[in-house]
Amino acid sequence: MPARSRRTAATHVDRRTFLAAAGAVTTVTGFGLALGADHRQAAAAPATDPTPGASAEAAASATARAGGPDGPEDGESALAAAPSGAGTTLVSVAAPRGTGGYRRLGEGPGWPRVVRADLADAQRGREDRRRTLASFVQFTDLHLTDVQHPLRYEFFRAGGPGGWRPHEALTLPGVVALVERVNKLRRGPATGAPFGFVVTTGDNGDENAAIEVEWFLTALSGGRINPNTGDPQHYEGVQNSNLTMYWHPDSALRDQDKALGYPRIPGYLDAAVRRVVSPGLNIPWYSTFGNHDLLSGGCYPAAGSFIADVAVGSRKLQTIPAAEAKWLMEGEGKGADPRGQRIEALLKSHAREMRTVTADPRRVPLTPRQYIQAHLDPQHTGRGPVGHGYGRDNLDSGNLYYTFRVSDRVLGISLDSTDPGGHYQGSLDSEQLDWLDRTLRRHRDEYALVFSHHPSWSMDNPVPDPRRPDDKRHGGEEIIALLQRHSNVLAWINGHSHRNRIRPRGTFWEIATASHVDYPQLARIIEIADNRDGTVSLFTTLIESDAPYRTDFHDLSQTGLASLYRELAFNAPGRDTTLDGAPADRNTELLLPRR
């Protein structure tokens, strides 16, 4: 399901771009429940709002990063190595070769680091004085996708070429290659400090399906993954439908993507549903919730609705008239149908045109508590912590927000910005907003990082929560104002827009990172350092997956598919070519005054 994030001014309807969220450069420089005693308990808005304690492994990692109990002041890393940009976009970035409709990729020049002094001046000599406070990696918008799901919204492509991703069958090899990149890098390029953890900022799956949650948890924690659903012997998605509006890689069908240069790759579909093996991250990781993790297609309430019956059923709608597709997309963009009544009517009106597929109960949508339960399953612990941020309090309450320890001096706060009433845009309920305020006040003597799926400019969703119909929803401007009242907040880190964008917010930085499904398929390293001159630096460095830039259409290995995932994404018809952002949104040093 394409990202619903921003409206476009283009004359054609492009579902991937019209819903992407809208959003001063200075010097350029180089699933069961098992809780252990050491579980990082999550704060689920109890009266006491406890700060989580670290798991044994995560606590040991934090101690090592700080140089031990008697280590260097301000959390200086005793294990820091010489900083290096190797393996990051500081050194190289995928770049197109040649001309024509379909372009191959190769290695291109890296992106420089931009020093941004919007909020504090850059003092000379800070490189020699600074002490590292934190080093970690942000993943966002992985969109691991069951492409044979009966209720995917590929039929929106009838309204425009950007309504479907030709490469989405390869999300799993692509994400595993990203895991492999982090495992190889191990350290931040600006400070040389080892990574403490990875945090996702939502849209971990695409369709709120139990099987996609299992894939996500296995990809990050390690294990074997079977991307096939439905009939174990035959692919049953739109790419063998004989409809020319979809790319048919195995077939000689002259589809609209081949007309633009997309290749014929015999064996592609068999390879795309073949087992994938992930080593899992070699550091702890934390999970944040996104709209696609709760809502069907990121827009419509799923669990317990008609959508749940369709999801586990045997009928799949593959195409609709173009005018109908455009009308539905425009309604989505305006939030005209948060409960999915138009989609329900659509499916009923086109029932006779549906393809028969193999039903699969693993496609059932999950409730928030079931989502939390899946994270607490010990088979998905990996490098920990148990629950990946979620704990018994979350399971009892159904709340998907919590705090965690970033380092000895920095607190992490993971929010749930998804509106359960529907619509792709975000907001917070009053209970969560009050919890956020209390948490920041309680930890006023520590620095704080806030993580959410939605950025401020995509948080304007007033749809009531069905559980609390009289409760007000709170948007981005109100959240910014709250964060500005707390001088300990360093940054608000998010995704959803599928776009790199960094904005100063008076007393903190807002950092939005591009997705790992739409090109340029990035993640972001974030390092924090006290410059010991009255300023703090936040370093942001983008990374690509570990897949080679060069592709070979005959190489259908797991690595070959990961490379192809990137190249197909670059060539996706109707894609937004501006998601990499400006130079000041990519590799940066963001300065702040130190409290």
Image (cartoon, rainbow, N blue to C red):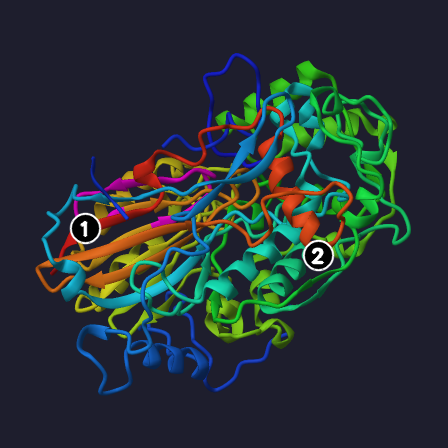
Q: For the point 35% across and 77% down, which residue is it? A: 62
The dot on residue 38 is none
Q: Is residue 401 above or below residue 348?
A: below
Residue 434 spot, x, y in % from top left: 29, 56
At mark 2, the secondary structure is helix
Residue 344 spot, x, y in % from top left: 70, 32
**Extreme residue toward the top, this view:** 11
Q: Which residue is mark 2?
A: 211
Q: Nearer the viewer, residue 93 or 60?
A: 93
Highlighted range, magenta: 493-509
Residue 103 spot, x, y in % from top left: 62, 29
Number of callouts: 2
Q: Which residue is mark 1?
A: 591
Quarter of the figure with the C terminus: bottom left
Q: For the point 24% across and 74% down, which residue is it? A: 75
- Is residue 208 located in the magenta-colored stretch of the structure? no
